[in-house]
Image (cartoon, helix red, strand yellow):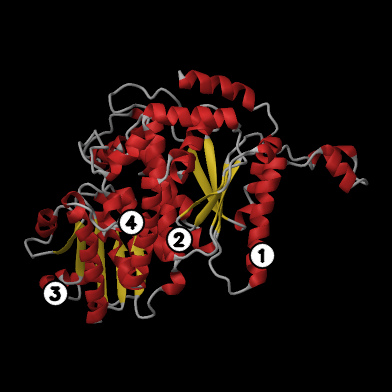
Amino acid sequence: MSIEKLRNLASSIVKQDLPALAADSPNQPIAAAGWCADLSRHYVDPSIEAALLSHADEIGLSDAISALFSAKIVNPSEDRPALHWALRLPPESELTAAEHQTTVDALLKASEIVAAGRYSAIVHIGIGGSDFGPRLYADAFADLRSDTLDLRFCANVDPLDLDLALHGLDPATTLIIGISKSFGTEETLYNLGRARTWLEQSLDPEQAAKHLLLVTANPERATAWLDGIPATTLNMPISVGGRYSIWSAASVAVMTAFGVDTFKSFLAGAASMDQHVKSAPTESNLAARLALLDFWNTSFLGFTSRAVLAYSRRLRMLPTYLQQLEMESNGKSVGPDGAPAPLATAPLLWGGEGSVGQHSYHQWLHQGTHIVPAEFILAPGAHSDTAGVEALTAHALAQAEVMANGRSLAEVKSEEPHLADHIARQKVHPGGRPSTFLSTREMTPERLGALIALYEHRTYLAGVLWQINSFDQWGVERGKTMATRLKPALTGREKADDPVTQRIIGQIQ
């Protein structure tokens, strides 16, 4: 019943004036874990808000939150709970103590590495969730990295990626950290194998093994990969998916290079957001409200993409991180029961760094033919210069205002009466572009932890609304399987089944 009501409401609201809706919005900003969110610039009025909240009750959004934090099965495809949140919260029961201990163990290992003082460089090898999170953290807080440790990353199977990561390093003082939960990820094992060979060109196999730290849920396979030499491993819980693993031992490289105290602040920020999501009622629960907006904008208003515009130097990699988190989680068209999802699901997520993006794709956002909801995230990286913070803030506020309110032909002619009519018309901004405005005073490790936790919970709750499983990724698995099958065709031992693929192989060769 609520779905049909929402459809009827959607058909009329898009004809409304967005600035008027925003001005009349009864919504007060929502504060959570050091963040403040303004949700008023959306095609939502009191009747739509009431209908969305009613649907949230009908589908059991609060129950879904309770299920997550009670370690119940929320990943039915693999019959598992999702315990990424347990990595950052002190364990309340034996159900999550083991997961939390893995993060404690990683922090201890990081402290041990620093205290030993044996290494001048760390090369982090992983892909997907085992790469995006630590890389985001390292880029965000580049100014906080230890002066004595060079931290580098490698993810791509293009040989150049590892060549660059190892360039100029001394094997005798380099630690290679490999991240693979299954210890079967092809790209990671390829790069790890090459890195191991690089070590063994200078060190004997047993010494080389001491320069490898492997993070996995399959330590037996790691030891077998080292030809029986006992591998130094850290545990990655099987109940934590790769795209949720930033809180885990997968981040041991950044724990080491940036200090365990900095990482503990990051965990504390996430734990603070967890408490908000766990305890706040739906109407004032920031994760739930953002999930409902995603549901509304995509499934009823037909907005097929969302732009994340991070006004923060520290967050320039956030859109890349969120692409995996949201699109791998909710890029589904079939629910856990095998039935098609009843509505359109997750939109394309893209974006970049403000104010840099204002000189490229913002033109399209303002005057293009597509309406794209935008998410402004204002989080200055430093307050070392007041003028810079003021400029950053002014630009973020101005972009959000112009996207929503536009610029009419009458305004153009009033402000620039000398313009020819055809030029004046080109300067019109249609407006009507909805947006969310998230802000915090300064981007710190604690605030980043809270922000990522917010997006994790939002993603899960949106999946509940769309009636899909946010914790599996069969599309990713299929691509890996096909790549393995095609390797014999590349060497000429076999032919590809698909004629176009075989033709392309011939062109490549």
Q: Where residue 393 sits in the image (x, y, percent)?
A: 64, 59
Mark 2 neighbour class, 10 Å CA radius: few under 14, some 14 to 19, many 20 or more: many
Residue drawn at (21%, 59%) of the image: 102
Using the image as rendered, state which of residue 219 and residue 5 is in the foreground: 5
User: Residue beneath label 2, please?
Assistant: 447
Number of the label disc, if any, that sits on residue 246: 4
Amino acid bearing label 4 = Ile
How packed mark 4 is, by other alpha carbons closer than 10 Å (few <14, some 14-19, many 20 or more), is: many
Q: Amino acid at mark 1?
A: Glu
Q: Which mark is residue 207?
A: 3
Q: Earlier in the sequence, mark 2 or mark 4?
A: 4
Nearest to N terminus: mark 2 or mark 3: 3
Mark 1 and mark 3 lie on one chain; the one further toward the N terminus is 3
Mark 3: few/some/many CA within 10 Å (<14, 14-19, 20+): few
Eye-nearest disc, 2 or 4: 2
Q: Residue at x 51, y 31 (%)?
A: 296
